[in-house]
Image (tube, grey):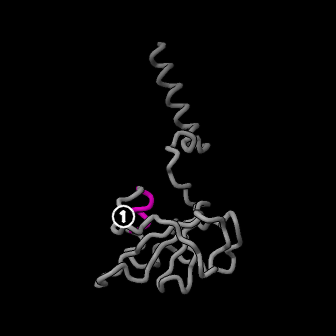
Amino acid sequence: MTNKRSRFVAALLTLLLALFGGTAAIAPASAAPAPTAVAQASCGDTSGLQVVKLSALPAEATDTYNLIQQGGPYPYQQDSTVFQNREGLLPSCSSGYYHEYTVITPGSSDRGTRRIITGSGGEYFYTGDHYESFQLVDVNS
């Protein structure tokens, strides 16, 4: 009888943790914040950016998003490095807030012009023109 009760309590705790987000408490410290559909930068306003569904971007953007979720390995040494936001097109945040990742361009002999920029608040931005413009990515679409 005690064994059944222990299994029941364990199952109940697992269910409660899953329902109330308790799994984040046991995630590794290096885990990226869980993405929301469209996260607002915790340090600024993103309302002026066009929102685009991840599924509407080139397929390689989804590949890059999946690599980010897995923590790599990334195809280029520069991937996951700090993005400085020198263009000032993203909200002004503290140094180290943004990181950049290459979105592979088929047929390109180098990294190409496509990138995903992540923010520490869980937001994702896409540029297809090497930082000349950005879109806020809805990662749940």
Across and down, in percent, residue 45 comes to 71, 72
Q: Which residues are magenta?
A: 64-70
Horizontal and vertical percent position of residue 123: 58, 66
The magenta stretch spans residue 49: no
Where 72 sits versus 101, above or below?
Answer: above
Q: Looking at the image, which residue is at 54% across and 86% down?
A: 132
Q: Secondary structure at mark 1?
A: loop
Residue projecting furthest to the top: 1
Residue under the image location 38 percent in, 59 percent down: 72
Q: Residue at x 46, y 76 (%)?
A: 115
The amino acid type, in three-letter code, at marker 1 is: Tyr
Left or right of 91 on screen, residue 137: left
Q: Which residue is mark 1?
A: 74
Is 73 displayed left or right of 94 in the figure?
A: left
- The secondary structure making up most of the magenta span is helix
Depth order, front residue of 53/65: 65
Question: Residue 127 at x, y = what percent?
Answer: 50, 80
Image location of residue 139, percent across then percent down: 52, 67
Q: Nearer the viewer, residue 73 or 62?
A: 73
Question: Label 1: few (<14), some or many (≥20) within 10 Å?
Answer: some
Corner quadrant of residue 98:
bottom right
